[in-house]
Amino acid sequence: MSTKGINYISRRDFMKLGLAAGGAAGALTLGSKRLRAMEQDLGGTDYSSMTGAEREAIPFTCLACNIEDGGVAYVENGRVVKLEGNMDHPNTRGKLCAKGNAGFLHVYDPDRIMTPLVRTGARGEGKWKRISYDEATTLLATKLKEVIDRAEAEHDPGIRNEIVFKWGRDRTGGAVQRFMHTLGSNAMLNHTNVCESSKKVGLEPSWGPDIESCDWANTKYIINFGSNILETAYFMNPNAQRLVDGVVGNKAKLVSFDVRMSNTSGFADEAFYPFPGSDGAIALAMAHVIMNEGLYDEDFIRDWTNVTSKQLIDHLKPYTPEYAEQESGMSARDIRRIAREFATTKPATTFSYRGPCKHVYGSYQEAAIHMLNVITGNVEKKGGYCLPRGMGWPQPEPVPHGPATPSPIATPPLYPLASHHVSTNAPYMIMKGEAKVSVWMTYYDNPVYTYPSSHVWESFLKDEKQVPFLVSFSPYMSETTELSDLIIPDVTYLERHDPESMPGGLYPCLSIRQPVIKPLGGTQEFRQTLIDTIHKLDQDGSMGMRKYFAFNTVEDWMRAHFDNIPGLKEEGGYNFLKKKGVWPIYGKVDPETAKIVDRNNNEVEPDYELYKSELSSGDMQGADVGNHGTIRKGDHSIGVRVDGKNYVGFGTPSRKIELYKDSYKKYGFNPLPVYKPLPSRSKKDSELVLTTYKVNVHTQSRTASVKYLAELYHKNPAWINPKTASARGINDGDLIRVTSKLGYLVTRAHVTEGIHPEVVAISTACGHSAYGRLAQLKQREAAAEWAQGGDPDVSHNVWWNDKGVHPNPIIQLAIDPIGGSQGWYDTVVTVAKAEAGDKYGDVKVSVEQSLKDYEETLRYAYTGDIHRSNHKEVDVDWDNLPKPELHGSSH
Amino acid sequence: MPIGLQAEPSLGVPGKKRWAMVIDLRRCIGCMACVCADKAEFDVPLGVWRTIVKVKDTGNYPNTKRHFMPRLCNHCDNPPCVRNCPTEATYKHEDGFVLQRYDRCITCRTCIAACPYNARHVLPKNRDRIKISGVIDKCTFCNHRVEKGLVPACVQTCLGRSRIFGDLNDPKSEVSRLVARNSTVVLKPEKGTQPQVYYIKPDRVMTEQIASHPVSYAARSDAHAFYQHNRGSKFFSGVL
C-alpha cells in the first residue's frame, strides 16, 4: 500500500497557518484559560513508574502496520520501555492503537534474528551458519554481479531483470527503487494486489489519487462499505478517532455494510449484511434512486465530471433497488431509504475498503461507491469525501534512471490497467517460463503465509531451479525467510531511518523514522546494507553505480531528502524532524474536542475544495483552453476553466472527475461503474463463501509473536451462522472441515449470530508455522542460536494453548482483470463436521489445482473468453483490442 | 505525599481532590489500545491485567450489536480492600488513589477476596523488565503520572476518547461536567464502595454481567487454558 497523495498544499498556505498560530494575543489566552479547570496533560512527557525519573523522549513514525502514525518512544537506561502517540502529529493526535502501543516488543522479540545467516543444509531445513554483515553483503554483491556481468557479456540488459526485489512493506521512501534502478532491473514487486489495488484502480482514473480522506469529525452521514475502519482499514487510528468524533460528537449517522459483524458494523447505527461482492449492486441502486428522484447535485455533475446527469440516469436504468435486493439480500425498501438519507443529509461521505474491492471486478465496485459522493456533490466539502493530503520530498541527486527493458512479472501484459502490479501471478508466470529469476530478494514480505494459495509460494521458493538464490532482509524467521539462502537482517522500525508522509487525515505532513536506540547487538539497518552492497559491487565507480549511493552515513541520506524543503528548511530541516518527528506543526490538540487549535483555542481548520485552487497568471502563461474547458500546457493538462475561472481541478487528463473512463473502455471494460455477478453468486445452496478478515490487535502476519497482542488474540475459529451450523449438525466449538477446490483445512466452529448465513469467515494473523516460537506456541523450546533470546515472561507465563489455523492455503487465486486485485472473498467452500482421523490444524491442498486456478483466472483478463462474454454491452471493436505487450517500466 | 491508611471519603469535600474516571461507552470502540498501553506502562506480565475491555455481542442475525466494557480498579471512596488488608499494604491516598505497598504485602489474598470488581491479582514470576513478583498488584490510576500532571496511560492512548480523567471535586473539570450532564452508572453501587469510575450510557447487558462466565466455545476454551496454567487467579480477558 504505497499511497502517494498529491501534493496540494503550497508553502503560501503554510505561512498563512504560521501567522494564525503566531498572532495570538496574551490577554485572550489568559481569559480563555480561566474558564477551564486545570486539567491533566494528555502526554508528551513520561516518568518511570518505579523511580519517578523522567524518561528520554524520541519521536518516531510507527510501522506496526502501514498507517504511519506519529509516535514518541520513551527510553530508560538505553531500553525502549514504552511508546505513545506524538502530540504534535496532526492526524495521530497523541494516540497509538494496540499494535502501536505494543510495538516496542518487536525490538525485544526473543526470536529476532541478530546476525546475518547463510544456509548450510537443504533449503528450508533450518541449518544456518552465522556470518558478519561484511561477509553477507560481499556474498550478495557477488551474486548480483554475476547477473550484471552476464547481461553485459550477452549485450542483453533484460537479463538484469532476473534480479527480483519483492517487498510487502517498503517504507524506505525510494531506497529500494534507487537500489534496483542502479542495478538496472525493473523486476520490482510490491504486495498491493493482495491488499487493495482494485480500490486504487477504481479511484485513480476517476479523480487522481488512490484513496479518499473522509472528514469524519464534521460529517453528518457515513456509509461504510466493507471497511473495518474501527479496527484495521487504512488509516485506522486517525480515522477511528475522527469517526467517533463524528458519530458521537457531531451526531452523524453511521451505516455499515459487512458480511460479518466487525467492530465497525457492531458500532454502527444501522448494519447490513450483504451477500459477498454485492456492495457494487447496492451502490449502483442507491445511485439509481438518487438520480431518478432528482436528489443529485446537478451543478457539480455538470461542472466537475465528464458525464451528464442524463447519461447517468440512462446508464443506471437496470440497477433498480429490486435488482440490488435480488443480488445482495438487502431489501429494496432499505436501499431506497438509505439512498434518500445519504443524498439529503449534508455533508455526507462513504468509506470503503477491502470488502467491495477484493473481488474479481472489485474496481467496478469501488468506482460505483465513489460515484455516490460525486453525484451528491460531497467531494472536498467540509464533512465530506475529500482527496488525500500527502506531501512529497526530493530524492538525493543523482537519481538513477529507470531501465529501458520492462519486466513481465512487474507489469504483466495481460493486466494493462493494473497500475499496482499483480504480484500474486509472479510464481505462476515464472513457472510457465515467462520470466526468469537469478536472485530474489524479499523485504518485509511473507508470501508463503500471506498470499492466496500460499502453498504455491512455498513450493516455488523452495525450488532452486526456479529461484536459484533467495535473500531475505527480515529480522524475523518468517515462513518465507526460513526458505532463504542468505539472511541479512534489517533492524526494527525503532532503530532505523526512513522518510514518511501518509495522508492519514486532512492535514498534510512529513515525518521520519530514526533510531530511538542504537541498533541492538550490532545489527545493521537495511539502508546501510544497500549502500555496502553497491559499494562492493562497484568498488571504483567504473560501473557507474557507486555515485547513486555516495552517502557517507545513512543520516546524510536523510538530510539530502529533508534539508532543502521550503518552509522546513527555515525551521531547521532534518534537525527539526529529529526533534519533533513531524512537520509542519499545525497547532495543539484540544483535550476536550481533539481538534487542532491555535494559541487562542480556535480550530486550525484544514483546507477544503482543493480542486478549486485557482491557477496563477504565471501558470496560465502559454496555456490553451481546449474542449470542455481543459487547460493545457504542452502535453500536460494543468487545470480546467469553469464559470470563467481557471482551477487546478483533479488529477485526470480532463482535470475533471472522470466517471467515464476511456482507459477501461480501451480494453473492453465498461467505462462506467457496473455490477457483474461473480461465480460465487451462483454457488450451490449447500456451499458457502469463504471470507477472511483482520482484527484490531494484529497485522496480517507480523504480530503473532508480539506477546501483548497474542495474549489478546491467538486463535481464529471459523465464524458460522447458527442456522448454517445447525443445518450441518455443527455445534459451537466442533471440529470442522472447510473444503475448497484446492483441498481442506480442519478448524473449529465459532457459531455466532454476527455473520451472513451463506458465509464462513476465518481471520488472518493466526496459525503460523514459523515467525518465532510464540507464534507457533513453542515458547518452551530453547531459542535458536542466532536469536536474541530473553523475556522469561514469554517462556513461562503464556497461558493460551491454541495458535489457530491459517486459511490461505485453501483460498483460490482469482484476479480482478481491471485492478489486478486478488479476489480474497471469492472462494466457494463446503463446511462439514470433521471426519474420523481429522486433527485440528490439518491442511491438505494441491499445488496442481492452484495452477489450474491461474489458467482459469486468465480467462477474465482482457484477452480472455470470459471477459468478452461478460462485457457484451461495451461498444468496442472486440476483434481489434490492443495486443498484449510489455508496457511501461515499473511503477 | 501524605498518606492515610483509610483516608476519609473525599468526594465533595472542599479543598480535597477526588480523582475519578468517566468511561463514555458511546465512544469505546474496543480497540484494546488501553490494555496494551497499560501492559507496557507497568511491564504487566502475561496472565494478569490492570485493565481490560470486555466484549459482548447481542441480538440475532441480522439485527446484531457489539458492546464493550472497559474495566479497571474503581478507586473506591470507601474501598473494602483497604479495610480488609491485615498488613496495611493497601491504603487509600487522600486524593483518592487506592494503592499497594509491595514491601508490606504478604500475599494473603484477603484484598482479592474483598474486592467486588476482580481488580486485583498476584504478580506472576518471570517478568521481563521489572522483577517484583509474588505480591498483590492492581491499577493505580497511574498515580505516578497524575502527580506529574499527566492523565493515566490508558486515558492517554484511548482512541475514541472514551476514558476521561480528572478531579471530580473541581466543578469546572471535564469529568464533573460529564457526570453532571449525562446519566452515569457505577458498578455494584449496592456494595457501598462508592466507586469512582463512572460509565456513560452503559448497556444493562454489560453492567449486570460484569463477571459473567464465557459463553462461546472460543472464550470457554481460553478460560480453560488459563485456569490450567494459572490456578487460583481469575480469568479476566477475551477478545473473541
Image (tube, rainbow, N blue to C red):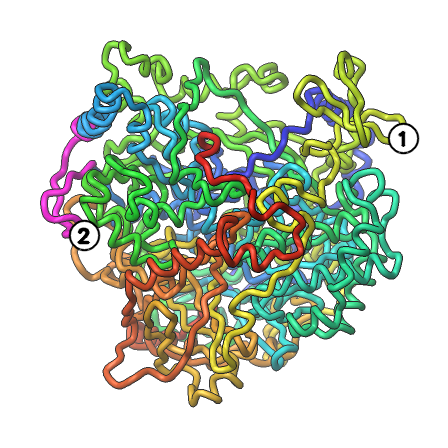
Marks 2/1: CA–CA distance: 70 Å
Q: Is residue A752 above or below residue A149?
A: below
Secondary structure type for disc 2 = loop
B178 or A130, which lies in front?
Answer: A130
Q: Which mark is residue A783?
A: 2
A802 or A295, which lies in front?
Answer: A295
Q: In the rendered structure, are the residues bearing label 2 and label 1 in contact, judged by CB atoms less than 8 Å apart?
A: no
Q: Nearer the viewer, mark 2 or mark 1?
A: 1
Pointer 1: what residue? A643
Residue B150 makes an appearance in the image: no
A342 or A564, which lies in front?
Answer: A342
Disc 1 chain ID = A
Q: In the image, residue A385 lies at what x, y percent?
A: 72, 46
Q: Is residue A612 left or right of residue B108?
A: right
Residue pictured at 67% horizontal, 74% vertical: A326
Q: Which mark is residue A598?
A: none
Q: Is residue A138 above or below residue B55?
A: above
Secondary structure type for disc 1 = loop
Q: Give the residues in magenta.
A: A116-136
Residue pictured at 34% horizontal, 50% vertical: A447
Q: Is residue A651 left or right of residue A729?
A: right
Q: Residues within 10 Å of mark 2 (few under 14, many from 20)?
A: some
Residue pictured at 74% horizontal, 31% vertical: A599
Q: In the image, residue A205 lies at what x, y percent?
A: 64, 40
Q: Residues within 10 Å of mark 1 (few under 14, many from 20)?
A: few
User: Can marks 2 and 1 be said to lie on one chain?
Assistant: yes
Q: How many marks?
A: 2
Q: Could you tell me the amino acid type at mark 1?
A: Asp
**Based on the displayed image, in which of its 4 quarters is residue A302 positioned?**
top right
